Amino acid sequence: MTKNKKEGRYRHLKITDVRIRLKDEEKLKGIASITIDECFVVHDVKVINGKDGLFISMPCKKSAEGEHRDIAHPIKTETREEIKTAVLDAYNRAVETKSEE
């Protein structure tokens, strides 16, 4: 959600496009780019196969100390869930399409 300071109202951001590049690695299963409100793109959202199933990892970089730090990430749980759902739905469609070929 974004806040319009002048009006004091929030509006919900909309994920308007998700593009997936499938990967066939043990843990890395795909890399997504998401477009928000047809005007802002976030690249390198990873689809990871973990011990409890698929999850997403936001784009990150490795610090000098060796820690991975997110470059971009949602602040609200609701937004993270929306991104997760959109990316995993697109991933599942891409897998289905590939298996039909």
Image (cartoon, rainbow, N blue to C red):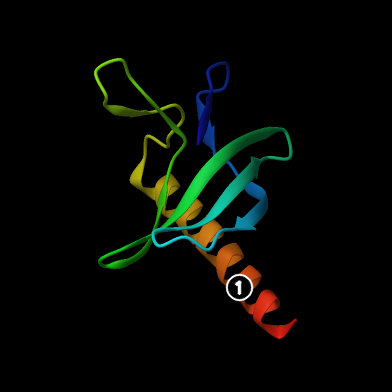
In the picture, measured across the screen, residue 88 lies left or right of residue 75, that is right
Please state, as top left, top right, bottom left or bottom right, where the C terminus lies in the image: bottom right
Q: Please, which residue is most extreme toward the bottom here? A: 100
Instruction: Using the rendered view, name the quadrant where residue 11 is placed.
Output: top right
Say which residue appears at 43% left-offset and 34% top-offset.
Answer: 73
The amino acid at mark 1 is Val
Q: Nearer the viewer, residue 68 or 83?
A: 68
Say if residue 12 shows up in the picture: no
Vertical relation: 23 (above or below) 78: below
Q: From the top left corner, tell me how far across and down residue 46 is, in percent.
A: 48, 49
Helix, strand or loop under label 1 = helix
Q: Nearer the viewer, residue 4 or 64?
A: 64
Q: From the top left corner, tell me how far across and down residue 14 is, in percent.
A: 61, 46
Vertical relation: 78 (above or below) 53: above
Q: From the top left corner, tell me how far across and down residue 8 is, in percent.
A: 50, 24
Label 1 crowd bin: few (<14), some (14–19), many (20+), radius 10 Å: some
Q: Please, which residue is most extreme toward the front here? A: 25
Count of numbered marks: 1
Q: Nearer the viewer, residue 92 or 80?
A: 92
Say which residue appears at 71% left-offset and 84% top-offset.
Answer: 100
Q: From the top left corner, tell me how far across and down residue 34 is, in percent.
A: 62, 45
Say which residue appears at 27% left-offset and 24% top-offset.
Answer: 66
Instruction: Using the rendered view, name the quadrant where residue 75 is placed.
Output: top left
Vertical relation: 21 (above or below) 96: above
Say which residue appears at 53% left-offset and 63% top-offset.
Answer: 24
Say if residue 24 shows up in the picture: yes
Vertical relation: 21 (above or below) 73: below
Residue for badge 1:
95
